[in-house]
Amino acid sequence: NLDIMDQYLTDGNRSIPKLAAFSEEGNERFTWGPRPEGAAQQFRTLTDQYDDKSELIGEFLEHYEDGGWREADAELAETIQSATETPVPTAEG
């Protein structure tokens, strides 16, 4: 649904993954994505360093290959837990 997607743009772009959670009443509980804050900062830095998008993406993917996915896992679990006050298991346990 593009109308909903356009309400959750990242820097003016439709970026995925993007998670938006709502209460039963339809109130927004939280949003997350498309990447954890540390990765977002790195992506902005790399954007300034690379003109070639394929080189930028290749360099950025190394962040996740080096364990950056754990940051996403932990940040998303913390976001869900804060919104629901329910413990959320992560890859780290």
Image (spheres, rainbow, N blue to C red):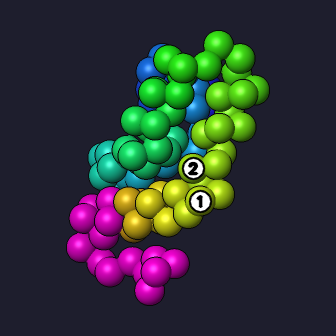
Front position in the image: 9 or 27: 9
Residue 57 sits above or below residue 48 on the image: below
Q: Residue at x 44, y 21 (%)?
A: 11
Identity of the residue drawn at 54% across and 20% down = 49
Classify mark 1: residues with Cα within 10 Å, few (<14), some (14-19) or many (20+). Answer: few
Work out whether 91 lies above or below 26: below
Q: Is residue 57 above or below residue 80?
A: above
**If the image is split into quadrants, where does the C terminus sit?**
bottom left
Asked if one can make out residue 4 in the rendered structure from this viewpoint, the answer is no
Task: Check disc 1 and report its element: helix, strand or loop.
Answer: helix
**Which percent across, then down, holds residue 57?**
68, 33
- Magenta span has 28? no
Residue 63 - label: 2
**In the rendered view, does 7 fall on the left or right side of 63?**
left
Magenta span includes 87: yes
Mark 1 belongs to which amino acid?
A: Asp
Magenta range is: 78-93
* 85 on left or right of 10: left
- Looking at the picture, tell me which residue is in the foreground, 28 or 51: 51
* Residue linked to disc 1: 66
The one nearer the camera, 8 or 40, is: 40
Q: Secondary structure at mark 2?
A: helix
**Marks 1,2: beta carbons within 8 A:** yes
State the image quarter where residue 41 is shown: top left
**Measured Cα–Cα span from mark 1 to mark 2:** 5 Å
In the rendered image of this protein, does residue 35 appear above or below residue 8? below
